[in-house]
Image: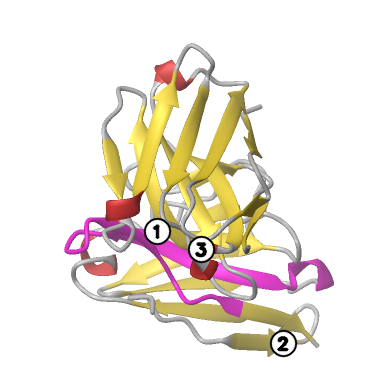
Amino acid sequence: QVQLQESGPGLVKPSETLSLTCAVSGYSISSGSYWGWIRQPPGKGLEWIGSIFHSGNTDYNPSLKSRVTVSVDTSKNQFSLRLTSVTAADTAVYYCARTGHGSGRFFDYWGQGTPVTVSS
Amino acid sequence: QSVLTQPPSVSAAPGQKVTISCSGSSSNIGNNYVSWYQQLPGTAPKLLIYDNNKRPSGIPDRFSGSKSGTSATLGITGLQTGDEADYYCGTWDSSLSAYVFGTGTRVTVL
């Protein structure tokens, strides 16, 4: 069974960098698939942040692209998110997820989510 | 604001059927596959439907998906109290080069 677990600070100061890691178990990242980050502000809907292929190819949400970096560490079977210059608008629950194998893009396995608050 | 529009809420009695629409455009639904997610209160989203109408293993056939033109629909039959949740559609948008989610629909079992 594929499992994903997010980890990182729950509180980040404005203008600083948010860094999260997603540890994957039950599946080798090197085997393939895109691995993504999605966030959900309090009381709001889902927003895709970006995805990375095991080879390192990335796709980012154009609205966040200038501030986002997603990277992968196949030796640790994990991938990471960096979001720079954060503001209160970046307060959200952050989820990591795997893109499933099908004709289109979809997220078949999700982490439980980690809440991040941006506040001084 | 999302490029995929869903009704804010739908409701029905136990055992009844509900449908949730997801309206987009040719750059997203019209030319890409649609997926649907269920988010129970306080939990992570769960994949219900992928590639327009396929169900992952373990998802009951009470849940169904369809697509026509630039719109997609999720159907839930035999509604149960455990189906009370938020439901989101999602797809790739070729113009934005981004994965987009719908605005979300809250299902209430009366």
Residue picked out by circle 1? B52
Q: Chain of mark 2?
A: B
Secondary structure of the residue carrying numbered label 1: loop
The reply, left or right, for residue A65 in relation to residue A80 is left
- For mark 1, does the 10 Å Cα neighbourhood hold few (<14), some (14 to 19), or many (20 or more) residues? many
Looking at the rendered structure, whether the residues under marks 1 and 3 are on a common chain is answered as: no
Element on which disc 2 rests: strand
* Left or right of B33 on screen, residue A39: right
Amino acid type for the residue under numbered disc 3: Asp
Q: Nearer the viewer, residue A116 or A26?
A: A116
Q: Quadrant of residue B67?
A: bottom left
Compared with B10, B65 (above or below) is above
Q: Which residues are magenta?
A: B81-105
- Classify 10 Å Cα crowding around label 2: few (below 14), some (14-19), many (20 and above): some
Q: Give the residue pinned by disc 3.
A: A90
Residue picked out by circle 2: B12
Q: Residue at x 48, y 47 (%)?
A: A17
Q: In the image, residue B1 lies at what x, y percent?
A: 38, 79
Which percent across, then down, holds residue B14? Answer: 80, 80
Marks counted in the figure total 3
* Residue at image location 25% in from the left, 74% down from the top: B69
Q: Magenta segment: does it hold A98? A: no
